[in-house]
Image: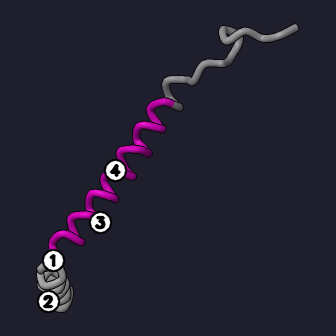
Amino acid sequence: MAKSPKDKPEKSKAADTKGQNSNALIASKLRGYYDTIIDEGTPSHLIDLLERLHEAELKAKK
C-alpha cells in the first residue's frame, strides 16, 4: 500500500527550533568572518596590480 504525503511524520517543534538555532549560529559566524575580512581592507600590492591592469586595458583599446 502506497503512503500518501499525509502519512509522513511531521517535525517536532523542538527539532524545528534546534534547526533555527543552528542556522542562526552559522549565520552569525559567517557574518563575523565576513566583517573581519572587510575590516582588513585591500592590500596595496593588489590595488597596484589592478591599476596597472586598468592602464594596460586602456592602452590596448587605443
Please give the name of the residue rendered at 18% of the width and 82% of the height, measured from the top-left corner: 60
Alpha carbon distance from label 1 to label 2: 20 Å
Please check the rendered image and state whether residue 29 is part of the magenta-colored stretch, yes or no.
Answer: yes
The answer to whether residue 25 is above or below residue 3 is below
Q: State the residue lying farthest toward the front.
A: 62
- The answer to whether 49 appears left or right of 26 in the picture is left
- The answer to whether 6 appears left or right of 2 in the picture is left
The answer to whether residue 39 is above or below residue 50 is above
Residue bearing mark 1: 61
Residue bearing mark 3: 33
Please give the name of the residue rendered at 67% of the width and 12% of the height, measured from the top-left corner: 5
Q: To which quarter of the image does residue 39 belong? A: bottom left
Look at the magenta stretch and give its main secondary structure: helix
Residue bearing mark 4: 27
Q: Residue 49 or 17: which is nearer the viewer?
A: 49
- The answer to whether 27 appears left or right of 14 in the picture is left
Q: Is label 1 in a helix, a strand or a loop?
A: helix
